[in-house]
Amino acid sequence: MSKLLLIASLSTGIGIAQAPVARIQDVRSIYVDSLGRDEGADTIRSKIITQLVKSGRFEVAIAPDNADAVLTGSGSLTKTYSSDANGSGDTSYHASAGVQLVVGGKIIWAEDINNRYGWNPYKGKSASGNLAERIVKALLEADSPTPTKQKKHS
């Protein structure tokens, strides 16, 4: 009778523990997947990889099979030109991305960042570089064992 009860319990899922949901703290390596086909997506991806390597917190894998997690999503870079009444103008760049960190088919972290200020000549950073830096900073803040106040990244 006890064997029958055990078989019934296993077949119905009773008594089977679910695996714990992965945490960012458990992730050691990340593969950065394509961020889509929009203009600038490959540049944003490349700069995210650079920022992850510079952080020293995560190893960056060259294939998803070699990583604990996959960073995926979409990103774009747009260029706008504005001019004043005198005909002088300025070109600015706008970068934005929505990214998700995925482990075992489950999203464990997500962020939308909108870099509406574009290139800043005083800091010497491009819109895509600034966006990548902000994405990795948000990921590192989420990885922090001490909860910090949520900042709006838009």
Image (tube, grey):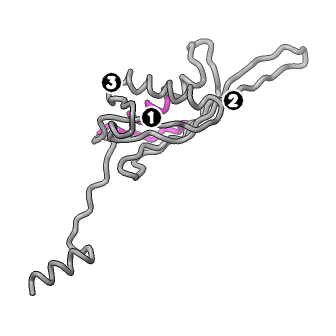
Q: Which residue is mark 2?
A: 78
Whether the residues at callouts 1 and 2 have beta carbons within 8 Å, the answer is no
Q: Nearer the viewer, residue 98 or 40?
A: 40
Magenta region: 133-154
State the residue at coordinates (37%, 35%). Answer: 30
Q: Report the side of 110 relative to 55 (left or right).
A: right
Mark 3 vs mark 2: which is more N-terminal?
A: 3
**Residue 99 seen:** yes
Residue 122, placed above or below residue 54: above
Three-letter residue code for mark 2: Thr
Q: Quadrant of residue 101?
A: top left
Q: Tag on residue 32?
A: 1
Q: CA distance from mark 3 to mark 1?
A: 15 Å
Of mark 3 and mark 1, the one earlier in the sequence is 1
Residue in the picture at 45% in, 41% down: 150
Q: Residue 56 has which mark? A: 3
Percent position (x, y) of residue 4? 14, 84
Compared to residue 129, the image places residue 65 above or below, namely below
Q: Amino acid at mark 3?
A: Gly
The Cα–Cα distance between marks 1 and 2, rounded to whole angstroms, is 21 Å
Give the residue at x 40% y 27%: 52
Residue 53 in picture, x, y percent from top left:
38, 24
Name the side, left or right, on which 14 lies relative to 103: left
Asked whether the beta carbons under mark 3 and mark 2 sit within 8 Å of each other, the answer is no
Q: Position of residue 79 (x, y in %)?
A: 71, 26
135 within the magenta span: yes
The reply, left or right, for residue 62 in relation to residue 76 is: left
- Determine which quarter of the picture holds residue 129: top right
37 and 74: which is toward the camera:
37
